[in-house]
Image (cartoon, grey):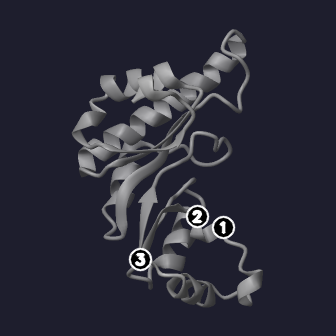
Amino acid sequence: MFIDSHCHLDRVDLKPYHHSFAEFMGEASAQQISQMLCIAIDLEAYPNMLALVEPYPQIAVSVGVHPNERDGKEPDVAELVALAYHPKVIAIGETGLDYFRTAKPEQEAQQVDWDWQQQRFRNHIKAAKLTHKPLIIHTREARADTLRILQEEGAEHVGGIIHCFTEDWAFC
């Protein structure tokens, strides 16, 4: 038995499966993958992602907006909370901070982008606390800010996992 704890099933290339998600799921089952957690990365694709996996009891989902997503709808706490009450939603995220794909902090214009990521992260933590659901955290080259925000927002009350991790043992 295997569990895929972080997948993006709505982004799978279905060509090898005759463009059939059902055929893909049959192959996953044949490979002993018994449970999957399909991770949301934006709110625009979320309804279609949920509709795609809804018939499959072995698939749970998260709701959130990835820190690198810049063009879509910005999630507020109330919307995340409302979406999180769907029975398939078991976590909040993918959320966090990703400074790797951005300019260096000494560039003044970049600080605005970091502030934006930090506020988004805070919104996700607040939603997780209100729904009592764990966080799925993406942190990349943002060690100090990630830890500071988790502590300031009281994320220890919901817990979660750090899925993208580029830090060291001291971070743990």
Q: Tell me which residue sits at (55%, 89%) in the image.
A: 26
Which residue is situated farthest in the right direction here? 15
Residue closer to the observer: 68 or 36:
36
Q: Tell me which residue sits at (53%, 63%) in the image.
A: 46
Residue closer to the observer: 9 or 172:
172
Residue type at mark 2?
His
Q: How many numbered marks have been drawn onto this rendered protein structure? A: 3
Name the quadrant of the N terminus.
bottom left
Mark sitting earlier along the chain (3/1): 3
The image shows residue 122 at horizontal and vertical percentages of 41, 32
Tag 3: Cα neighbours inside 10 Å, few (<14), some, or many (≥20)?
Answer: few
Residue type at mark 1?
Arg
**Residue assigned mark 1:** 11
The image shows residue 59 at horizontal and vertical percentages of 43, 74
Q: Tell me which residue sits at (33%, 52%) in the image.
A: 81
**Residue assigned mark 3:** 1
Left/right placement of residue 6 relative to residue 111 reads: left
As helix, strand or loop, the secondary structure at mark 1 comes to helix
Left/right placement of residue 108 relative to residue 39 reads: right
Asked whether the beta carbons under mark 3 and mark 2 sit within 8 Å of each other, the answer is no
The image shows residue 27 at horizontal and vertical percentages of 59, 86
Residue 8 — which label? 2
Left/right placement of residue 122 relative to residue 132 reads: right
Q: Nearer the viewer, mark 3 or mark 2?
A: 3
Q: Quadrant of residue 97?
A: top right
Residue closer to the observer: 114 or 135:
135
The CA distance from mark 3 to mark 1 is: 23 Å
